[in-house]
Image: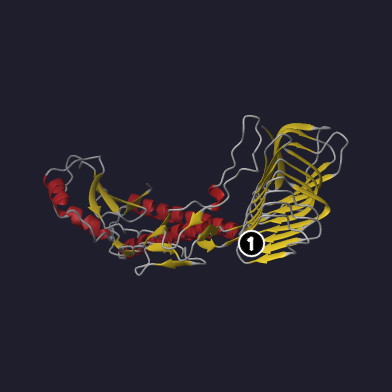
Amino acid sequence: MQENVAPTSKRDLVEILFSDDGITAYVKLTKPQEGEEPITKQDLPAALETAQVTFGIKEEMIEKLAARPIYGIKMEVVHALPPINGEDGEITYLVKRDTDYKPEFNEEGNIDYKNLDYFQMAHKGQVLCEIKKEKEGVPGRNIFGGELAAKSGRRAPNPAGKNTVLNEDETLLLADVDGVIHFVKDQIDISETMNLRSNVNNVTGNIHFPGDVVVEGDVCDGFSIKCGGDVIVKGVVEAAKIEAGGNVHIAKGINGGGNAELSVGGDFHSQYIEGSVITVKGNIFADYIAGSDVTCHGNIELKGKRELVIGGDVKLCGELIAKDIGNERELPTRIEVLRTAIDNSEEIKALEDEKKSCSDNLSSLRAAEAKYKTAIDAGADVQADAYDRLVKQIASLLERVEILEHKIKREKENEGFAFVGSVTCKRKLYQGVSIHFADQKYRFTFDNIEHCRIYWNEGEIVQATL
């Protein structure tokens, strides 16, 4: 805790120090030399008054120090009223989020995509989450009598989505229908499900459904599925089109032949991805990706026998984790880490709050400096050392304000976007693979690179060893 020194009124025998946050003040007494007047009961309140300390004074402590001085040690004599920040509202979910789903591996390290429990069902009237209301803060006061603002608690986000309802006092969220639970950010939707016990082909035609779709067979060439929820295909996807507002799970993989097109609003799970054009808002989980044009706004994690990316164009915002990228024949494989929007408003606010606190302290110190100058102009006997310390403290605070202004400017200039993604290769990264961060391209230093992670740091591409 940084401390400030206030000017005193009696030969520096009484020194007042106070914390930067304006909550606590201390007195430090110096023993009078032989022949000097002793410290009296009136000197302590007078020193506090000179320092403009008016609130939170511990009268009993002042009395004790006046009666029995303690020299050379800081003694707390003032403690103001710190603000009590409010409490944020909270949501306690009683059902699992979509991202809590984790596929299990068998002893060979493979995922059994055919036997996954994709559904989390809800029944009408079921409690989905509990909502704790926010609480307001209680303002405090500093040692100078000024008000210290308290942070108010933030309201919890509204979790009510499709087919859900809040109770009367809005502390519980209930399911309004029987159906499948689906999260949209912090909101819970309940969707009904279309279950097709055959292939999507010329018998069923194209599928267009507002909820979830489960296909027991394949999605055949030339057909499409468009839905507002999740899509589960227990067979393969051929040269077909799938557009889903939620997650997509394909048990046996995609054999697109260059003509499969998928747009996924959540996470994407598939045994493998071949010859496809895929855009995914969430994460991708698969064994390998070959010859495909993939855009992923989350992470790409490859797990299984091959864990490979080969050929095609992969763009992502998060982290790509693979065992091998490219091959010995140097098949062209392009990977691009995309810029990600960031919110540094909290950092900016914290810096601006600190700047305001320093400015407030400067105002108090400058008021004390003005009193000194008035006394000096009037020819009064003023302690030069105390005045010099005050001037140095003002200079120090001015320097801190300048530093904070520079930091605030820099944060505002960097506000908006950053590269947070990376490329992790657990075994070998081959020539023929190009890795890009915007207009900058990673340069190979060797023919092949093993066990590496490539990421962006302070304006340049960095290669680290795993």
Rendered location of residue 432, percent (x, y): 85, 40
* Neighbours of disc 1 within 10 Å: few (<14), some (14-19), many (20+): many
Question: In the depicted view, which residue is nearer to us: 112 or 384?
Answer: 112
Q: In this view, does 444 lie above or below 393?
A: above
Rendered location of residue 248, percent (x, y): 65, 54
Residue at the (57%, 59%) spot, across then down: 343
Which residue type carries mark 1?
Gly
Q: Quadrant of residue 297?
A: bottom right
Rendered location of residue 240, percent (x, y): 78, 57
Q: Quadrant of residue 205?
A: bottom right
Q: Let me know if residue 35 appears in the view.
A: yes
Q: In this rendering, would 234 be left or right of 405?
A: right
Number of disc labels:
1
Question: In the depicted view, which residue is nearer to us: 114 or 310?
Answer: 114
The residue identified by callout 1 is 245
Q: In this rendering, would 137 be left or right of 306?
A: left
* Residue situated furthest left in the rendering: 67
For the C terminus, which image quadrant? top right
* Residue situated furthest top in the rendering: 107
Residue at the (45%, 55%) spot, across then down: 395
Q: In which quarter of the image is residue 55?
A: bottom left
* Residue situated furthest right in the rendering: 329
Q: In this view, does 253 lie above or below 131?
A: above
Residue at the (64%, 39%) spot, across then down: 112
Question: In the depicted view, which residue is nearer to us: 339 or 166?
Answer: 166
Instruction: Kindly state the secondary structure of the residue where label 1 is placed.
Output: loop
Q: In this rendering, would 294 be left or right of 400?
A: right
